[in-house]
């Protein structure tokens, strides 16, 4: 429990209306989108309105040894915003201004609380897009997605958040403000700080401004659905599309369990007898190129025993993407706890990973569906369970251990896009080895010696 004088100092800094201490408010910030994690209420939620206020809050927290948990929309799936050690949740909902759209330089400067879709709406009138596209674009913030290095549906062709952050302003644990990078395409002055803070999950500094790269919006696109009788055929089609030198904007997979659940949930006419579906979109600036790429995709799908259906209208296209975006909410409707992982493998091991996930589900007698960004090897094995059933939760934990082990055995990684947070800390050494974990600890201790920035996350080191 914080001393009342700290609350009063916070109120003096940012105004009473930006300091929340009511029980209902604190409970609302005790969890995020991650299932199966302990909840913890913070002592206080503070809504800063400027970088200077953030600096003052950090200095006050440091003087009084109070933990700070930065928070965007709380949609992360690794427990990244849960205030494990109480203290201050720093919510960026009032720092949500688009400060600059520079169509000549193809950049935008934004505050961290800007929602990704809001940026895309604003730049659309210049014929531009900001490509990183997590399933939560309508709610997730630029600060949260940068700190998480979010990927999403367009990652295969366009890359992930780290490819689009050109510069930043960050408040460090001692309250100092640093700015680096900016509007220049090239910048090799100093270390690559942007890429240090992107994906740092709020553990190294607090992002208070971002310079984002924009690109011209593709003019043409073709959306298709491939329907397969076996997972192997679907996996081979993914590899075949890439081997045909087509890089679709989006190449998503759903297994039988996911297809059936989405269809029950949304009634959009998906083939529930199929073993796997691929949703594929090719796009570009030239109609000829897009048509040639779509033809190649059709050929590969057919060669791998798939039935191909092309969207004939915007409405059909929208319903295919609705199907994909409904995958998680649909699965989530089946039970009270959804464990969604994002183990990622090299593309050539997609089929192996899909099959092993199914086998693990059967071995532990669990309801397990897999969907995800097949084109970049980033799958979402999703286990539905009942948190009140201790025995089932035990089987779920064993299954998750095996899923991560399989991903690493296939040359993959623990997390393609959801980050480490609390949930995956215990596996970090399996991927990085002790020397890798030590390097993370060294960085953390240098930048945040008192472990006050998002403590308990990402870095499995004593004291954190
Ligand atoms: C249904 C669903 C679908 C999803 N689909 C995808 C997907 O396709 N791809 C994908 O990559 N992710 C996906 N996610 C995960 C999530 O939406 C993304 O990680 C998202 O970008 C997080 O943004 P946020 O604003 O909610 O961040 P938050 O959850 O609020 O925060 C994320 C992390 O960033 C830190 N943080 C927040 N703001 C700052 C700041 N200003 N400075 C420093 N650190 C900060 C937090 O402490 C936390 O560690 C999905 C989640 C759900 C629930």
Image (spheres, rainbow, N blue to C red):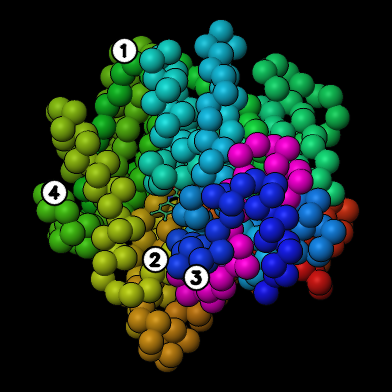
Q: Is residue 36 magenta?
A: yes
Q: Quadrant of residue 289?
A: top left
Q: Which residues are magenta?
A: 34-57
Residue at 81% from the left image edge and 63% from the top image edge = 64
Vertical placement of residue 149 versus 271, above or below? above
Q: Which residue is mark 4?
A: 268
Looking at the rendered structure, the secondary structure element under dot 2 is strand
Of badges 4 and 3, nearer the viewer stands: 3
Q: Earlier in the sequence, mark 2 or mark 1?
A: 1
Q: Which residue is mark 3?
A: 23
- Badge 2, how many Cα within 10 Å: few under 14, some, many 20+? many
Residue 382 marker? 2
Looking at the rendered structure, the secondary structure element under dot 4 is loop
Q: Earlier in the sequence, mark 3 or mark 1?
A: 3
Q: Quadrant of the N terminus?
A: bottom right
Vertical placement of residue 311 versus 61, above or below? above
Determine the CA span between mark 4 and mark 1.
30 Å
Vertical placement of residue 232 versus 221, above or below? below
Q: Is residue 258 magenta?
A: no
Determine the CA span between mark 4 and mark 3.
42 Å
Q: Are marks 2 and 1 in contact (CB under 8 Å)?
A: no
Observer-nearest residue: 288 or 223?
223
């Amino acid at each position: 429990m914080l001393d009342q004088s700290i609350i009063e100092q916070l109120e003096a800094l940012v105004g009473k209306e930006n300091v929340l201490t009511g029980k209902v408010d604190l409970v609302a910030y005790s969890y995020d989108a991650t299932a199966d994690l302990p909840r913890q209420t913070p002592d206080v939620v503070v809504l800063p309105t400027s970088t200077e206020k953030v600096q003052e809050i950090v200095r006050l927290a440091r003087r009084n040894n109070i933990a700070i948990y930065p928070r965007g929309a709380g949609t992360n799936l690794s427990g990244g915003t849960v205030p494990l050690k109480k203290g201050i949740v720093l919510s960026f909902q009032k720092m949500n201004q688009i400060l600059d759209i520079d169509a000549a330089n193809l950049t935008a400067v934004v505050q961290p609380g800007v929602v990704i879709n809001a940026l895309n709406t604003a730049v659309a009138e210049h014929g531009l897009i900001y490509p990183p596209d997590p399933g939560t674009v309508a709610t997730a913030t630029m600060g949260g997605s940068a700190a998480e290095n979010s990927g999403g549906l367009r990652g295969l062709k366009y890359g992930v958040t780290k490819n689009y952050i050109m510069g930043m302003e960050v408040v460090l644990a001692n309250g100092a403000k640093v700015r680096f990078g900016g509007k220049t395409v090239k910048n090799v002055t100093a270390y690559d700080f942007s890429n240090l803070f992107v994906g740092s999950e709020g553990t190294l500094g607090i992002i208070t401004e971002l310079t984002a790269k924009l690109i011209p919006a593709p003019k043409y696109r073709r959306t298709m659905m491939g329907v397969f009788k076996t997972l192997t055929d679907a996996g081979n089609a993914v590899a075949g599309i890439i081997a045909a030198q087509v890089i679709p904007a989006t190449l998503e997979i759903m297994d039988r369990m996911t297809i059936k659940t989405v269809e029950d949930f949304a009634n959009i006419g998906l083939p529930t007898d199929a073993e796997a579906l691929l949703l594929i979109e090719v796009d570009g600036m030239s109609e000829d190129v897009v048509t040639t790429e779509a033809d190649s995709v059709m050929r590969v799908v057919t060669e791998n025993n798939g039935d191909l259906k092309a969207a004939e209208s915007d409405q059909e296209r929208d319903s295919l993407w609705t199907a994909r975006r409904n995958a998680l909410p649909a699965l989530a409707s089946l039970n009270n706890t959804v464990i969604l992982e994002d183990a990622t493998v090299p593309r050539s091991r997609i089929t192996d990973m899909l099959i092993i996930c199914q086998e693990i589900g059967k071995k532990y007698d669990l309801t397990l569906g897999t969907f995800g960004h097949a084109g970049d090897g980033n799958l979402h094995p999703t286990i539905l369970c009942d948190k009140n059933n201790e025995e089932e939760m035990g089987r779920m934990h064993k299954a998750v251990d095996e899923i991560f082990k399989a991903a690493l055995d296939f040359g993959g990684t623990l997390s393609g896009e959801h980050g480490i947070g609390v949930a995956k800390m215990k596996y970090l050494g399996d991927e990085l080895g002790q020397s890798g974990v030590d390097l993370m600890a060294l960085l953390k201790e240098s930048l945040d010696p008192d472990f006050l920035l998002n403590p308990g996350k990402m870095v499995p080191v004593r004291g954190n």
